[in-house]
Image (cartoon, helix red, strand yellow):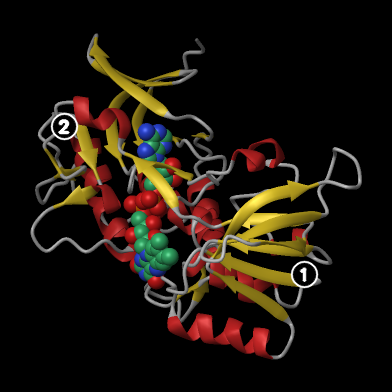
Amino acid sequence: MPVHDIKDITIIGAGPTGVFAQFYAGMRSASSQIVDALPELGGQLTALYPEKYIFDVAGFPKVLAKDLVRALGEQAAQFGQPIHLSQRVVGLEEGDGHFVLVTETDRFPTRALVVAAGIGAFSPRRLPQACAEPWYGRGIYDVVTDPEVFRGKRVVIIGGGDSAFDWGVQLLDRATRVTIVHRSDRFRAHAATVQQYQAAVGAGRAELYTFHELFDIKCESGPERFTHIELRDVKAKSTRVVDADVVLPMLGFVSDIGPLGSWGLNLEKDEIVVNSMMETGRPGVYAAGDVTTYPGKLKLIATGFSEAAIAVNQAVHWIYPERKVTPGHSSNMKLFGQSED
Ligand SMILES: Cc1cc2nc3c(=O)[nH]c(=O)nc-3n(C[C@H](O)[C@H](O)[C@H](O)COP(=O)(O)OP(=O)(O)OC[C@H]3O[C@@H](n4cnc5c(N)ncnc54)[C@H](O)[C@@H]3O)c2cc1C
């Protein structure tokens, strides 16, 4: 099992909180590393809403979620500390004066830990139909990061929530045909987006099948790609064939707080109870972002940034008691080429 170099601070989670925490560790001259189960930076912003605008991040009148992630990544990258993606944390060991964070494949020694694990390690809910399984990655994609990939394709989206309708609208001008299929006629999506999509259906630019589900996948052009899918009317039990090059299941995510439950942290409904110093009750282990709870907690990007700064400053002081908790002002720091006060 590969063992990485010991770092001052290891951050679980590459969501906005974790990436900002890594920047902050660099600003405090602490070495750091991030470990995340997903293949890309950004946590919920990348996995759930990369193409949505965010309006309540300080300093940005509006910013696309994927652009905010890119900017956070650039800000953290100036200190050249590693980010280890596709690494799901499964355990935490302690001994010889440091921790070792254990993933499915690697070991990450660390002096302190900042848990920024959001809603846990999440993965898209898969289509329950067995016929879909062999097509994952070859026409069925449950994570969309670049809508351009679907230009000129006949796309069927399965689901009735925000992601289904957001992508439905995003793809109208790119795909040759967009079809949304949902098992009921009740949608869990923003009403304005549903109306926008329904207007496209009214104008003959898209299709919407309510009370339908995937029934079968047909490949008439060889085993490499499919050309049609069969839908079943869940009320009438009849079936119909729809042209499709691509199926996007948008069925939400299942998240799992995983091993955190057994680390001796004070948990309340899968959230870590922290005090105003982001301490978790276990010395050397801090938490920040959506994973934390305390009276008045707001699960927002802005809150995560603030908690990341507090957690990292506390962790630095805990590892190196001679270093102050208070970071000073970045606008005066030599590190950024400024003259110290
Ligand atoms: C559709 C939608 C719209 C939103 N809009 C806004 C908005 O407009 N403004 C706003 O402020 N907030 C918004 N939010 C909320 C915002 O996205 C969250 O508050 C934010 O993502 C929390 O960041 P985080 O870094 O704490 O956690 P997350 O973004 O959840 O990131 C946590 C990371 O930890 C990783 N992780 C967890 N467990 C493990 C493990 N065991 N091993 C390895 N990695 C692990 C996960 O893979 C994930 O990448 C929105 C959320 C959604 C779903």
Could you say which is closer to the camera, residue 180 or residue 42?
Answer: 180
The answer to the question of whether label 2 and label 1 lie on touching residues, with beta carbons closer than 8 A, is no
Residue 240 image point, x, y percent = 71, 63
The answer to whether any part of residue 17 appears in the image is no
Residue in the picture at 71% in, 90% down: 203
Q: How many labels does the image show?
A: 2
Q: Residue at x 76, y 58 (%)?
A: 149
Camera sees residue 168: yes
Q: Is mark 1 on a helix, strand or loop?
A: loop
Front residue of 98/39: it is 39
Q: Is residue 234 above or below residue 107?
A: below
What's the amino acid at mark 1? Ala
Horizontal side, residue 297 vs residue 8: left or right: left
- The image quadrant where one finds ligand 1 is bottom left
User: Does 226 appear above or below 9?
Assistant: below
255 vs 139, left or right, is left
Q: Which of 82 and 144 is in front in this view?
A: 144
Q: Dividing the image into 4 quarters, which one contains the C terminus? A: bottom left
On the image, the x and y values in percent for residue 89 come to 39, 28
Q: Mark 1 — residue?
A: 175
Residue at 54%, 57% (x, y): give it: 250
Q: Provide the residue designation for mark 2.
A: 321
Where residue 210 sits in the image (x, y, percent)? 55, 71
N-term-proximal mark, 2 vs 1 = 1
Residue 247 in the image: x percent, y percent? 68, 55
Callout 1 crowding tier (Cα within 10 Å): few <14, some 14–19, many ≥20: many
Q: Regarding mark 2 in the picture, which secondary structure is present there?
A: loop
Q: Give the mark toward the camera: 2 or 1.
A: 1
Q: Label 2 is placed on what type of residue?
A: Pro
Q: How far apart are marks 2 and 1 (CA)?
A: 58 Å
